Structure formats: C-alpha cells, structure tokens
Image (cartoon, rainbow, N blue to C red):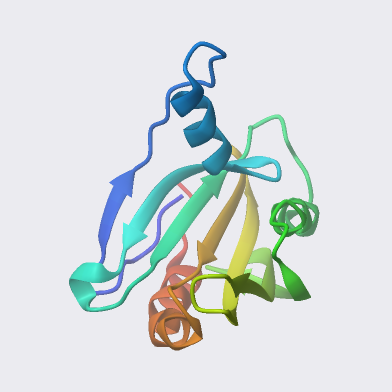
Amino acid sequence: MSFDLAAAWKPKKIEVEPADEENPLAEALADLTEQGTVRMACEIDAKPAGNIGFLRVWRGDASDRDDPGAVLKAFTADDPEAKKATYTRVEAGGLPAVEVEYTVYSELLEEEKRQRAFAVSTPDGPVVVHLGGMDTAEHTAMLPAYELAKRSLKLG
C-alpha cells in the first residue's frame, strides 16, 4: 500500500525489537507500537512542514482478514482515553474503508483533542492510517495531509 505525502512531510519506518522479559525498555516500546490488532509500521512527521504531529500507519497480520470497521473499533477501544467515537463508511483510494473521528483527553494541555483514522483491508492484512496532533488546532491544520493520504491510497 502507498499514498501521496503532503509537501515536506517526512516518512520514517518504525522497527521495534520484540518484547523480551529481560529487556523492559523493549517491552515498553513494543507496547507503544501495538494498538488493537495492529502494529505501527511507519510515521510521517509533520514538523518539517511546520506542524506538530504525525500520520501513523499501522498494519495487521495477513491472516487477520477482519472487516476494516472491526479493526478500527479494536484500535480505538485499545486507547483508554478515546471518547465520542463516530464511525463512517468511506472510500480510501477507491477501496471500501471505515473512518473514525474521536477525542482523547490531553493531561498536558488539560483539554480534549481530536483524532481521526481510517482502516482498509489489503491482501497483506488490515491497515490503519491515524492522524493525531498536539492539540485540536494542530490536528485541524494537518487534515489536508490526512485527506490526501486517504484520497491517493493505492494497493501494490
């Protein structure tokens, strides 16, 4: 799967050592890179474009042929701060997809902030593309990059 990136956004592959009882740091990092039934594969940094946030791509196993909605609900349910989730059937690059909009509480900012993600099924397994942001203003400023990714998504 691929999609177009907004100008100046920088992608980076995420590689995490497998969790290991003898290495607590590896286990903590592994926990941060797993959510629901998917694992983080890469993140696209918005800082070079002047925003604070990331598009993150999460992948599931090829054997996991779940409906994109089920994958997205598991993803959202695994975030204890996720609230007010609204799911919508959409298209991503012409493929059937499910999108969620929700809020999470930021302890740092002491306020709710918006989040958004979409999920698609691919022959290699489910994929979730998530847009966060430091706060709702950053999230809103980065929405065009998210929409570009959703619109330009291609398999292969």
Picture quadrant where residue 116 is located: bottom right
When the figure is inspected, residue 68 is found, relative to residue 150, above or below; the finding is above
Residue 110, horizontal then vertical, whole percent: 57, 79
Side of 130 where 96 appears, left or right:
right
* Residue 87 visible within the image: no
Nearer-the-camera pick, 109 or 81: 109
Residue 106, horizontal then vertical, whole percent: 56, 72
When the figure is inspected, residue 84 is found, relative to residue 149, above or below; the finding is below
Residue 2, horizontal then vertical, whole percent: 41, 54
Picture quadrant where residue 8 is located: bottom left
Nearer-the-camera pick, 10 or 149: 10
Side of 17 where 36 appears, left or right:
right
Residue depicted at x 41% and y 82%: 138
Residue depicted at x 75% and y 40%: 65
Side of 25 where 60 appears, left or right:
right
Number of labels in the image equals 0
Nearer-the-camera pick, 104 or 125: 104
* Residue 151 visible within the image: yes
Residue 126, horizontal then vertical, whole percent: 64, 46
Residue depicted at x 39% and y 87%: 141
Residue depicted at x 45% and y 73%: 133
Residue lying farthest to the top in this orientation: 22
